[in-house]
Image (tube, rainbow, N blue to C red):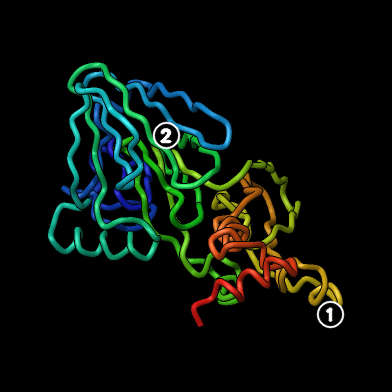
């Protein structure tokens, strides 16, 4: 069963071009391997320091962001490589991954016999698994991808509006994950999922968006009054997401975690008088 390597659209056996994006469907078309027909068995362990434990059958393969693996059994063979068939595709793919906040290389894990491999994020948070049908895509925040079945396509996506790009907290760039297959992402704190109906809107702190479906309209709005802007403590803008589609948000962003940990790195809570004094006395200036 062939699928486009760019957009995931299902193709007919005789197709010369993809009807979804126009890419040539000849040698470049992706054919779902027989091993992906087997359901991927997995478990997500833990609470806020979660681990995705994947149970691979012979021939099954997944690829992961470099440095996300925790363990593997000896029956799992691994190889680090760039994606793409030509030098140009590999270099362009590496460039796109750097823009997405990911590493230059992916690591591929293939089972020669039944075995296990475990993956985790880099900071406290939760892992979310997306079961994507052929051609279905999900947009996720930069640097959140962990691993996926080899039939899944990971690509770069740009926000459609300049205002959302400049003020949205995530910049212009998001990651686009396209099925078929199961993909795993990681984000901070706990997660909340919303299933928005047609025309239903939710307003979210700009940095707290984890993922949303392509059908969801994404924009940025000014918070309101000057008093709210100055004293509300929520920043100048909120992200507005309008259905239909699913939206996933996180309770803790990496930026908030860094900000809260900063007083401890400097030797005290700088928001208190004693912490401020300790920061002054501990300064080398």
Residue shown at 63%/55% (left/top)?
208
Instruction: Please give the name of the residue rendered at 40% of the width and 21% of the height, measured from the top-left corner.
Output: 41
* Neighbours of disc 1 within 10 Å: few (<14), some (14-19), many (20+): few
Task: Name above or below for residue 111 compared with residue 83.
Answer: above
Reply above or below: 227 against 133: below
Locate residue 224 relative to residue 195 in the image: left or right. Answer: right
Mark 1, secondary structure of its residue: helix
Which residue in the rendered view is the most extreme toward the front? Answer: 281
Question: Quadrant location of the N terminus?
Answer: top left
Q: Which mark is residue 226?
A: 1
Q: Is residue 9 visible?
A: yes
Q: Residues within 10 Å of mark 2 (few under 14, many from 20)?
A: many
Say if residue 207 shows up in the picture: no
The spot of residue 52 in percent (x, y) is: 43, 31
Return the residue nearer the eye: 45 or 30. 45
Quote the CA–CA distance across marks 2 and 1. 45 Å
């Amino acid at each position: 069963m062939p699928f486009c390597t760019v957009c995931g659209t299902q193709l007919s056996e005789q197709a010369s071009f993809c009807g979804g994006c126009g890419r040539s469907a000849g040698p470049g078309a992706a054919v779902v391997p027989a091993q992906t027909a087997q359901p991927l068995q997995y478990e997500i362990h833990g609470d806020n320091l979660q681990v995705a434990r994947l149970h691979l059958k012979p021939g099954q393969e997944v690829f992961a962001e470099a440095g996300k693996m925790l363990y593997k059994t000896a029956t799992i063979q691994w190889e680090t490589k760039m994606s793409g068939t030509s030098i140009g595709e590999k270099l362009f793919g590496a460039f796109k991954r750097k823009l997405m906040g990911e590493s230059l290389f992916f690591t591929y894990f293939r089972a020669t016999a039944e075995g296990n491999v475990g993956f985790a994020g880099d900071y406290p948070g939760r892992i979310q698994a997306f079961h994507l049908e052929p051609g279905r895509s999900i947009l996720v925040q930069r640097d959140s991808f962990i691993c996926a079945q080899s039939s899944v396509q990971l690509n770069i996506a740009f926000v459609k509006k300049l205002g959302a790009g400049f003020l949205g907290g995530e910049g212009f760039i998001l990651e686009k994950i396209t099925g078929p297959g199961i993909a795993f992402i990681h984000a901070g704190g706990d997660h909340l999922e919303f299933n928005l109906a047609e025309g239903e809107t939710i307003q979210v702190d700009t940095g707290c968006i984890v993922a949303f479906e392509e059908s969801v309209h994404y924009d940025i709005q000014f918070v309101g009054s000057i008093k709210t802007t100055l004293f509300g403590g929520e920043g100048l803008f909120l992200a507005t997401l309008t259905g239909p589609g699913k939206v996933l948000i996180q309770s803790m962003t990496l930026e908030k975690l860094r900000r809260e940990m900063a007083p401890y790195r400097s030797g005290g809570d700088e928001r208190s008088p004693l912490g401020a004094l300790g920061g002054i006395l501990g300064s080398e200036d």
